[in-house]
Amino acid sequence: TPYYMDLAAGGDIASKSMDGIRWGGLVGHALGAHIVVTHIGLYGGLSKKEAARRIQASLKALTKWFEDHELKPLLGLETSGRQEVFGSLEEVLQLCKDLEGLQPVVNFAHIHSRGGGSLKLQEDFGSAIIIITHDLGIVAHVCDRVYVMYAGKVVEEADVRSLFHASKHPYTTGLIES
């Protein structure tokens, strides 16, 4: 998608941003892409809560549009490095948990910048690494927190110990038993 996107702005800016994402979805689908990545938007003069509400409404409309047009790519939400831009890792993960058809996209340079240069030593990356795997044995050894995704949506979130002792979603149970 075009680099500048603002799904929180409302009006013409949000409309043009959504059009750019739709276009990216059409092109991505035609090319066989699995994911179309976009930035999300600015807080502007909005509270974080209001920006999140507007962005979620825009993303809900976009994912429905992707579904209605039978577009295969997921919509990837990239983390942002700027404090004034919506897109902390927590914000991105929450949107992906709340809405189907979204995929978090982690840009470590953005995590580093947003954290004020927080990723300098090898140990610093341990708290920022996201492992994407079906092998929960690996997860048990290297992760503290787990987000289980099914069909492009986060269906379960837990610390590792809780996940293995009291999983709640059938897909998670299947992964543990495999």
Image (cartoon, rainbow, N blue to C red):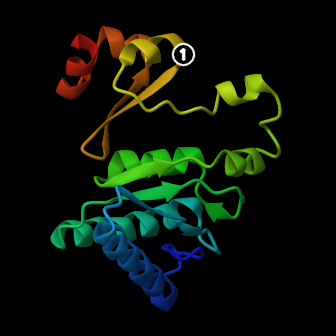
Q: Residue at the spot x=22%, y=11% of the render? A: 177
Reply above or below: 51 against 23: above
Disc tally is 1
Q: Residue at x 58, y 56 (%)?
A: 87
The C terminus sits in image quarter: top left
The picture quadrant where one finds residue 65 is bottom left
- Where 58 sits versus 49, above or below? below
Residue 11 drawn above or below residue 96: below
Q: Residues within 10 Å of mark 1 (few under 14, many from 20)?
A: few
Percent x, y for residue 150? 26, 38
Which amino acid does the dot numbered 1 rest on? Val
> Which secondary structure lies at badge 1?
helix
Q: Is residue 70 left or right of residue 57?
A: left
Q: Nearer the viewer, residue 53 or 31?
A: 31
Residue at 44% from the left image edge and 46% from the top image edge: 94
Find residue 57 and report its horizontal and vertical position in percent.
Answer: 36, 68
Q: Nearer the viewer, residue 57 or 171?
A: 171
- Check disc 1 and report the residue beneath it: 142
Location of residue 28 in the rendering, given as x and y in whole percent from the top left corner: 36, 68
> Which percent across, then down, holds residue 111?
68, 46
